[in-house]
Image (cartoon, rainbow, N blue to C red):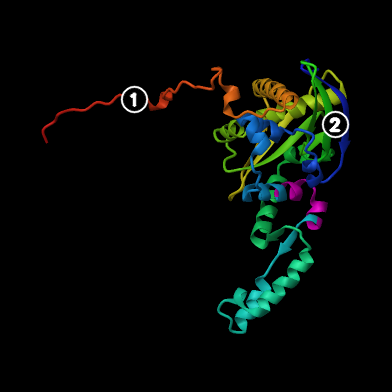
């Protein structure tokens, strides 16, 4: 059980991703990662969805909630209409009036849903098929709950109360296992730990595990697994279990960041990088990184 915080109240709900993100009064793990940059980033950074983020959302829905995929996404396939128009002599079929009329009709059918082209859809199918051939992956992602939102009010050791939210990709309550799907450029044992450090996955693993443990109020903790799959053929993947070292560092960081967030709320101040500078004027000592310190040897050779 955590000695840093106690849960005052909580609610576990099956709601949409959009509703989860709309609850700005709760801080999420993503918010803590912004606080780690600086509170100013959390307060004022312009948040934009990248192509990688959009693909990741589609991937999660396709793998974890296939029954929702067709409701939330529209498969856009213009190969048939292009083939017909080319057969009629069109050199640039997508520039024709017939194509534009057809496209307008397709967008009405899509009704605002994000569109997935056939190439991306086939890629999702290949990734899923590769993943689900593995028996332990199937075990981690079955007989549990997908994409549940957990909203908590917690009291931290300094006495402040904070609203925190988490959204585990998949958890198995009886086995006390949380599984998180990650798409990545490198899932090897050499590559993925670097990505995990870069994107603060240790912070997520510790926060999610500890909140779920506090909710259950049992001595036995939760195990946190990452299933990392590459986005290029052959769509190789790896399974990683969070180690005690990984979780301990994540726990240390989320505790510090929650205390900083509580201070910012209490004082209505959202400082930039200066809050991480010991000097009271915000002045940092500039040193060269170790990798840049090199000898320069030169020789007056006669060539």
Magenta-colored span: 59-71
Q: Does the residue at mark 1 contact the one at mark 2 (Cβ under 8 Å)?
A: no
* Quarter containing the C terminus: top left
Classify residue 120 as left or right of residue 13: left
Let me know if residue 61 is in the magenta part.
Answer: yes
Pick whichever, 199 or 263, lies toward us.
263
Instruction: Find residue 259 and report its image quarter.
Output: top right
Q: Distance between the residues labelled 1 and 2?
A: 54 Å
Q: Which of marks 2 and 1 precedes in the sequence? A: 2
Q: How crowded is mark 2: few (under 14 residues within 10 Å), some or many (20 or more)?
A: some
Q: In this view, does 5 lie above or below 35?
A: above
Q: Is residue 195 visible?
A: yes
Q: Which mark is residue 294?
A: 1
Q: What element carries label 1?
A: loop
Q: Mainly helix, strand or loop, the magenta region?
A: helix
Q: How crowded is mark 1: few (under 14 residues within 10 Å), some or many (20 or more)?
A: few
Q: Residue 143 carries which label?
A: none
Instruction: Find residue 20 and report its image quarter.
Output: top right
Pick whichever, 104 or 57, lies toward us.
104
Instruction: Find residue 268 and report its image quarter.
Output: top right
Q: Where is residue 80 in the image (x, y as percent from the top left)?
A: 68, 74
Residue tagged 2: 173
């Amino acid at each position: 059980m955590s000695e840093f915080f106690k849960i005052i109240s909580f609610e576990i709900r099956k709601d949409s991703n959009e509703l989860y993100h709309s609850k700005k009064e709760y801080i999420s793990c993503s918010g803590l990662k912004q606080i780690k940059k600086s509170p100013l980033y959390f307060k004022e950074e312009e948040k934009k969805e990248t192509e990688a983020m959009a693909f990741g959302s589609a991937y999660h829905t396709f793998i974890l909630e296939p029954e929702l995929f067709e409701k939330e996404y529209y498969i856009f396939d213009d190969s048939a209409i292009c083939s017909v128009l080319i057969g009629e002599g069109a050199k640039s079929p997508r520039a024709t009036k017939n194509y534009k009329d057809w496209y307008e009709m397709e967008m009405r059918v899509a009704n605002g849903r994000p569109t997935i082209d056939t190439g991306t859809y086939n890629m999702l199918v290949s990734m899923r098929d590769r993943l689900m051939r593995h028996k332990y992956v199937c075990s981690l992602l079955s007989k549990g709950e997908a994409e549940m939102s957990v909203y908590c009010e917690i009291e931290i050791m300094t006495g402040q109360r904070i609203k925190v939210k988490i959204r585990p990709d998949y958890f198995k309550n009886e086995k006390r296992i949380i599984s998180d799907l990650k798409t990545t450029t490198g899932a090897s044992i050499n590559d993925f730990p670097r990505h995990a450090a870069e994107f603060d996955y240790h912070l997520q693993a510790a926060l999610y595990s500890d909140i779920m443990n506090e909710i259950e109020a049992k001595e036995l903790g939760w195990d946190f697994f990452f299933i990392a799959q590459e986005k290029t053929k052959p769509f190789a993947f790896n399974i990683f279990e969070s180690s005690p070292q990984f979780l301990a560092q994540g726990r240390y960081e989320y505790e510090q960041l929650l205390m900083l967030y509580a201070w910012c709320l209490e004082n209505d101040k959202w400082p930039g990088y200066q809050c991480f500078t010991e000097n009271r004027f915000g002045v940092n000592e500039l040193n060269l990184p170790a990798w840049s310190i090199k000898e320069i040897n030169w020789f007056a050779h006669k060539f």
